[in-house]
Image (cartoon, grey):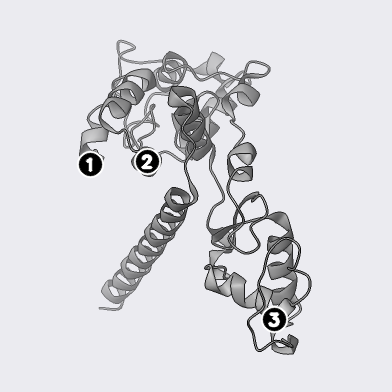
Amino acid sequence: MFAMDDIRSKMICSYTDIAHESRSELTDPLSILLEARFEPCQVCGEQSSGLHCGAITCEACKKFFLRSINGEDQKYKCVRNKDCIITRNTRTQCQYCRFQKCKIIGMTVKEGAEIQQTPRVADIFAQISCYVCQAPSSGIHFGAITCEGCKGFFRRSIKERAPSRYKCMDNGTCEINVATRNACRYCRFQRCIKVGMSVEGSRIGRQSNLFKHHMRMMLQRNGQIPNATMLHQMVHSTSSSSRNKTSSRKRTISESSSSESE
């Protein structure tokens, strides 16, 4: 897997070149999807937030492009030779060159462009069984791959604080499947907990456009669909990454506050 610095060094390449090089070395679907989370913005090099207007960009460059195509670009002028280097630190210094970079990498809002670029992953998840009842899943909900029925059941249970009222007439040994899942709410809820569903996991699995893009590219390349194990590993890797980033931000804020008090 490429390191962050390795990927950033390739930012001058087009996305096609980056994708081609990545796929030539990364044959494991999980590795490809995990690597996608660290791709830089093709405009300024900052960590990207997803696939926007046909290119992988950060939120700032996405919003800049959308403002520009509404006529703002008519006012852009370059005071140099129209060859300014666009980075995270310099991107606000020359709007002209930044907008040109957006166009060079293929950003567009042509009718239908976003629809074509936004892949469907529902069919992929439908081929993977719900961790709770084995029905076709619909995505990652509350931190686990589940169907809509079990997602709704878990949400209602938490919202109504109902688990404490759930009772099992068979000593908590009920089998939970599509046909029996409504027969015992106690065992169904315990199954939800066992497979990893939690309130904290509600933010896990909101697939970004970038995730969907790589999922689609994976399918186009060889028709390989990630199995439940791959997706499970990806979910928890994403969760761990998010927790680490949150902890890092908290430490930074804490250290900053301490410095100010001194």
Picture coordinates of residue 115, whole percent (x, y): 65, 25
Q: Is 69 on the left or on the right of 81, as rendered?
A: right
The kind of secondary structure element at disc 2 is loop
**Which image quadrant: the N terminus?**
top left
- Front tag of 3 and 1: 3
**Which image quadrant: the C terminus?**
bottom left
For marks 2 and 3 on the same chain, the one whose residue lies earlier in the sequence:
2
Q: Is residue 194 above or below residue 31?
A: below
- Res 198 → quadrant: bottom right
- Res 97 → quadrant: top left
Q: Residue at x 66, y 62 (%)?
A: 133
Circles 3, 1 touching at the beta carbon (< 8 Å): no
Q: Amino acid at mark 1?
A: Ala
Q: Residue at x 25, y 30 (%)?
A: 25
Q: Residue at x 38, y 61 (%)?
A: 240
Residue closest to the eye, 153 or 60: 153
- Front tag of 2 and 3: 3
Q: Is residue 58 above or below residue 15?
A: below
Q: Residues within 10 Å of mark 2 (few under 14, many from 20)?
A: some
- Front tag of 1 and 2: 1
Q: Is residue 126 above or below residue 181?
A: above
Residue labelled with disc 3: 186
